[in-house]
Image: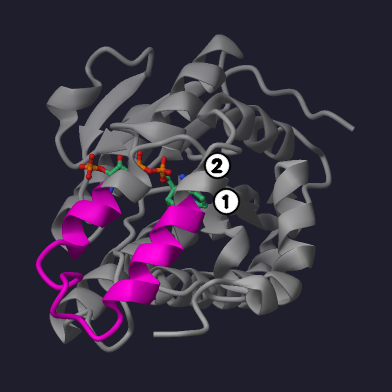
Amino acid sequence: MKRYNFSRVVLITGTSSGIGRAMVQFLADKHYMVIATARDAERITDLPAAAHLSLDVTQQAQIDEVAQYVMQQFGRLDVLVNNAGMAIRGSLEDVPETMWETIFDVNVMGPVRMIQAFAPYFRRQQYGHIINITTVRSLWGMPFLGSYTASKAALDALTMALSDEMAAWGVFVTLVRVGLTKTPLFQRSKQYSEPWMTSHSPYWNSYQRGQKMFERIVRFAVNPQVIAQKVENVMSSSRPPRVLTIPLQARIFDNLSPLLRWLGPLRKT
Ligand SMILES: NC(=O)c1ccc[n+]([C@@H]2O[C@H](COP(=O)([O-])OP(=O)(O)OC[C@H]3O[C@@H](n4cnc5c(N)ncnc54)[C@H](OP(=O)(O)O)[C@@H]3O)[C@@H](O)[C@H]2O)c1
């Protein structure tokens, strides 16, 4: 069943590219009042949003400023979408501790900070919806994306806990587990890995084979507009799901994951 969605106020993190950017465009077309945020607000001025704000989810002061601004200008927030995220490639052994800290700071503590900033307003309003974007691979982990999938697994778990904690105030919480989508995310992750995933790594050969397999799978990735449409379905539902895996091929892939491990070309050095 659909809820009335005209002029609902939605804040999205990480809208400079990919899924975040597609969501702003899709929601604006549907007459939502979208607060688009990005680390560099200059990169989102072209988006059809009601506000374009600078927001780095690792910066508490910026988050507090944004929360205050939203309440002053809009008087409420209906939906918070924790979309900002990053990925790093590399074996568990090779990825330096500082990068493990960085990815958890962005992918786990970023949403935690955003939720802590807006939860008091949601409780006061006695309604609201928090949507956290994670990955279909968080359950199984993924070789050479261990830091990424582990951070998303943490986000999965805290989202489930939060959904029970906030239910008493009528606040919905949805975990959207997304499958492979055509965005700059994984190309960027390759750039991050360049300093350590070199021929000096003991994992170099299996990493290379894994990359080839990944490049083949990436061809089946969906466009971010597909994800934006499904997320809008969730936010306009009167009974939003607690967990949603999208698109359909991601659900199939998820179910095949344990089998794929045994077929994988990674089982030799
Ligand atoms: N693409 C996929 O296949 C896939 C699959 C499953 C889940 N996801 C998830 O979908 C979400 C969106 O990713 P995407 O695929 O659309 O990739 P993307 O195009 O790289 O978008 C990631 C966004 O997060 C922003 N971001 C990174 N660090 C940030 C920080 N510290 N503060 C605020 N924003 C920050 C980036 O901004 P900058 O431009 O400033 O870096 C960018 O706007 C992520 O949570 C990702 O994990 C993607």
What's the magenta region? Answer: 188-214
Instruction: Identify the residue under disc 2.
Output: 79
Q: Nearer the viewer, residue 68 or 51?
A: 51
Total marks shown come to 2
Rendered location of residue 265, percent (x, y): 54, 72
Rendered location of residue 32, percent (x, y): 55, 20
Quarter of the figure with residue 249: top right
Instruction: Identify the residue under disc 1.
Output: 131
- Residue 59 appearing in the image: no
The residues bearing labels 1 and 2 have C-alpha atoms spaced at a distance of 7 Å
Rendered location of residue 98, percent (x, y): 14, 80
* Mark 1 in CB contact with mark 2 (< 8 angstroms): yes
Indicate yes or no whether the magenta region holds residue 229: no
Viewed as shown, does residue 83 lie left or right of 239? left
Rendered location of residue 121, percent (x, y): 47, 53
Quadrant placement of the N terminus: top right
- Neighbour class for label 1 at 10 Å: few (<14), some, many (≥20)? many
Residue 109, compared with residue 244, is above or below; it is below
- Sequence order check, earlier mark of 1 and 2: 2
